[in-house]
Every structure is written in structure tokens, then in C-alpha cells.
Image: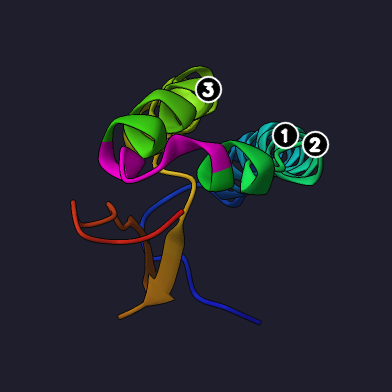
Amino acid sequence: MVSVGEVEPAAVVATLRSALDAIGRLSGERAGIEEALKVEKNKDNILPRIMAAGGQHDRLFAEELKKYEPLKARLLAARAAARPCGAVFVLGTGRLAPRMAHSGDAL
């Protein structure tokens, strides 16, 4: 049995369920983003354009990378949504304590 200190066990259970729901939502969002990235990557064959570019590779790559901007925006939005929900918890020192992710952490 884990000690929850002065916190009501029912409140701890509710908090943990809420955190698990948030993790589930984030997992679903992440899976959707990963699938969209996989689809975009699989249909992205620029080899013929590279061969025809004749030295204009920097411009070509910049243009091609623009296709990924919507996915990048979705990823950044999902990451921003994950931070305030406090979905990661640490059980320790006899109480339930929320743990916020650092800005450098990966999703």
C-alpha cells in the first residue's frame, strides 16, 4: 500500500484517473501525428526533382520541407498541451506530487 499522506485516497484516485485519461489522449494524438508523418514521408520522393534541379538543392529542400509545416504545428500544439496537464506523476515521500516536464524533454 502506498501512503498518500494527508490527501484523501479518493482524491488521489481521481487525480490518477485524470492523469491516465490525459496520457491516453496525448497518446492518441501522438499516434495520429506519427501516422500522418509516415504517410507524408512515404509519398515524398523528390529524387527526380533533385536530379532535374541541377545545383539548386538548397531552394528545392526548403520548398519540400514546407510540406511538413502542418505536421510540425500539430506536434508543437500537442507538446504544449501536454505540459500544463501535469500528466506525469511521481509517488514519493509519502505523498502524490505532480512533476512537470522540462522544456528540453521529448514527447
Graded by Cα atoms within 10 Å as few (under 14), some (14 to 19) or many (20 or more), the crowding at tag 2 reads few
Span shown in magenta: 52-58
In the picture shown, does residue 33 fall above or below 66?
below
| Tag 3: amino acid | Lys
Q: Nearer the viewer, residue 92 or 74?
A: 74
Q: Residue furthest left?
A: 103
Q: Considering the image in quadrants, where does the N terminus appear?
A: bottom right
For the residue labelled by badge 3, is the local secondary structure a helix, a strand or a loop? helix
Point 56% across, 47% down: residue: 51
Q: Quadrant of residue 23?
A: top right
Q: CA distance from mark 3 to mark 2?
A: 11 Å
Query: Residue 64, position in %: x, y?
Result: 48, 30
Q: CA distance from mark 1 to mark 3?
A: 8 Å
Q: Which residue is mark 3?
A: 67
For the residue labelled by badge 2, is the local secondary structure a helix, a strand or a loop? loop
Q: Which of the labelled discs sits on residue 43, or is there none? A: 2
Which is more N-terminal, label 3 or label 1?
1
Residue 21 within the segment the image draws in magenta: no
Q: Which residue is mark 1?
A: 40
CB-based contact (under 8 Å), mark 1 and mark 2: yes
Taking the image as shown, residue 43 lies to the left or right of residue 89, namely: right
Query: Residue 66, position in %: x, y?
Result: 42, 22
Query: Residue 36, position in %: x, y?
Result: 74, 32
CB-based contact (under 8 Å), mark 1 and mark 3: yes
